């Protein structure tokens, strides 16, 4: 795409230089969103198992959902840390180095996001701790009264509600973070956060479907419910994606490039439309369901790659832009 096309495509707005985020941040956007929504689905399945006389049908998948969310938090924190210029100072995002007091700046998205990740990590850890005893029955600590107390109705409800809230925040926050950076594409739509939230929800559901099939930890009815839920979210994701592109206005011409091809073929075609067509089949084998879930995960990753890197490749020239 030539400079004149980019100059015409962009509004007369001042844009900052690209933050030059690496692939570590891209992976964080994907894993963080998946982990946050996986916690919600695990909590939903957990609640359903508590209402069912045959709780054993979903209990193993609930545990894997909590494990996935907690592991996702750990990986997300690691990715954010190694992306820093001076990784050993990561704790400065949370603690004031001179006073030792908490460092929280409500007006700075990075500060809010760091604390949200800590809170989500706390609740996903408590949820994981509450169910880990089923897989490690010989570990006495996991059979102790305080740990068993976490599974009681009151504490569990608090963990589930607050953990889900923090998880959804993390899933959508990554898109909001882009919107406040004042970069082409990112700053031209208020729908990036919603798009990432919906995409993260579909990725979380697909991750649980893959776990259920690969580990054989859920009954077909549970897997069927997850697949149906995922398809409904994919339909919503397609609508939000279309609305996002429309909201970009003239900026959408940036995608008259190979980024647009990747968006159309990889995200829409392979990650949304094909899984929806597969769901319409009369018979579904475990292998077909696993392949479809893998395509959804691929589409979720490619969506973040297109949104993130397409703007990163735009070079600022005054109030206009040009491809690097």
Image (cartoon, rainbow, N blue to C red):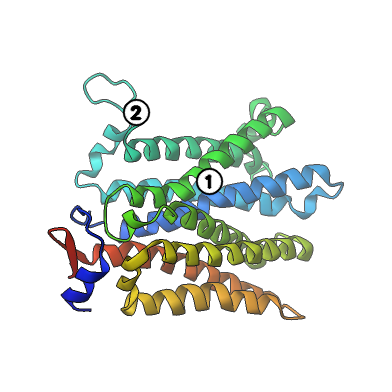
Which residue corresponds to the image point at 24% horizontal and 44% vertical from the top-left? 87
Which residue corresponds to the image point at 23% horizontal and 70% vertical from the top-left? 8
Residue at numbered disc 2: 104
Towards the viewer: 273 or 204: 273
In this picture, residue 236 sits left or right of residue 258: right
Q: Few, some or many C-alpha atoms within 10 Å of disc 1 (few <14, some 14-19, many ≥20)?
A: many
Q: Position of residue 258 (x, y in %)?
A: 32, 79
In this picture, residue 224 sits left or right of residue 33: right
Q: How many marks?
A: 2
Q: Position of residue 81 (x, y in %)?
A: 30, 46
Residue 284 to residue 152: above or below:
below
Residue at numbered disc 1: 168
Q: Position of residue 130 (x, y in %)?
A: 64, 37
**Disc nearer the start of the sequence (2/1):** 2
Residue 234 to residue 55: above or below:
below
Assign a secondary structure to mark 2. Answer: loop
């Amino acid at each position: 795409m030539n400079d004149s096309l980019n100059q015409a495509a962009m509004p007369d707005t001042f844009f900052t230089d690209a933050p030059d985020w690496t692939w570590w941040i891209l992976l964080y956007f994907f894993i963080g969103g998946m982990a946050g929504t996986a916690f919600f689905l695990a909590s939903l399945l957990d609640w359903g198992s508590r209402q069912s006389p045959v709780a054993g049908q979903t209990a193993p998948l609930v545990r894997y959902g909590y494990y996935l969310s907690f592991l996702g938090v750990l990986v997300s924190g690691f990715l954010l840390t190694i992306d820093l210029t001076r990784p050993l100072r990561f704790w400065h995002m949370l603690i004031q180095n001179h006073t030792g007091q908490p460092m929280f700046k409500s007006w700075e998205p990075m500060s809010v996001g760091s604390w949200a990740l800590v809170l989500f990590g706390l609740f996903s850890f408590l949820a994981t701790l509450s169910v880990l005893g089923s897989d490690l029955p010989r570990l006495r600590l996991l059979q102790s009264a305080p740990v068993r107390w976490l599974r009681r109705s009151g504490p569990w409800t608090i963990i589930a509600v607050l953990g889900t809230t923090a998880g959804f925040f993390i899933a959508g926050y990554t898109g909001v973070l882009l919107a406040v950076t004042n970069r082409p594409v990112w700053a031209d739509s208020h729908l990036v956060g919603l798009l990432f939230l919906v995409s993260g929800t579909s990725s979380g559901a697909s991750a649980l479907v893959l776990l259920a099939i690969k580990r054989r930890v859920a009954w077909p009815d549970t897997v069927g419910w997850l697949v149906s839920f995922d398809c409904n979210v994919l339909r919503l994701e397609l609508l939000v994606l279309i609305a996002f592109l429309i909201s970009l206005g003239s900026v959408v011409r940036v995608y008259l490039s190979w980024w647009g091809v990747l968006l159309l073929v990889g995200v829409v075609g392979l990650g949304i439309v094909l899984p929806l067509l597969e769901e319409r089949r009369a018979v579904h084998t475990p292998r077909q369901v696993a392949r479809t879930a893998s395509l959804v995960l691929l589409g979720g990753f490619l969506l973040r790659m297109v949104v993130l890197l397409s703007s990163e490749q735009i070079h600022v020239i005054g109030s206009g832009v040009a491809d690097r």
